[in-house]
Amino acid sequence: MKEETFWDRTLPLIKAHGMSIKEFTRFSGFPYSTFRGWIYHKRVPHISDSNRIAFALGVTLGYLLNGKDRNVAALRLRELDFRKSAARIQALADEIQKEINLLKPLKKRVLT
């Protein structure tokens, strides 16, 4: 069984946030080339950079470094799923409201 690395835990979280690596680097303030270099060479960033990555992803540094606090990461992934679902529901509610607003003028015309 292959042991998970820092990047095995980090990259799926970036994807779960709905971001590409390039988008994540812009969001978190890292140079794209530096970030890609860390991944390509399988290097764990300096502790302050690793902590910044963990903070941006909403997980603990312990999880990214050694897989501890796995439950925290699992909860974060569930939260992201809930937020995506909530956003889809809100979009549907907005769409329904627009349709209702289009129907309102028709009711007024029929009544007068």
Image (cartoon, rainbow, N blue to C red):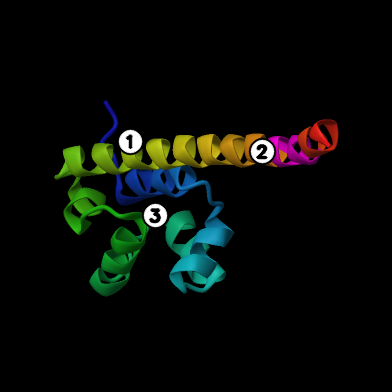
In the picture, the disc for residue 78 is 1
**Quarter of the image containing the C terminus?**
top right
The percent position of residue 39, horizontal first and vertical second, equals 45, 56
Left or right relative to 23: residue 51: left
Dot 2 corresponds to which residue? Answer: 95
Per the model, the C-alpha gap separating discs 2 and 3 is 45 Å
Front in this rendered view, residue 106 or 33: 106
The percent position of residue 27, horizontal first and vertical second, equals 49, 66
Left or right relative to 56: residue 36: right
Label 3 crowd (10 A; few <14 / some 14-19 / many >=20)? few
Q: Is residue 82 above or below residue 18?
A: above
- Residue type, numbered disc 1: Arg
Per the model, the C-alpha gap separating discs 1 and 3 is 27 Å
Dot 3 corresponds to which residue? Answer: 42
Q: Secondary structure at mark 3?
A: loop
- Residue range corresponding to the magenta coloring: 99-105
In primary-sequence order, the first of circles 2 and 1 is 1
Residue at 77% over, 33% down? 107
Q: Is residue 25 above or below residue 76?
A: below
Rendered image quadrant of residue 57: bottom left
Q: Nearer the viewer, mark 2 or mark 1?
A: 2
Does residue 44 appear in the picture of this structure? no
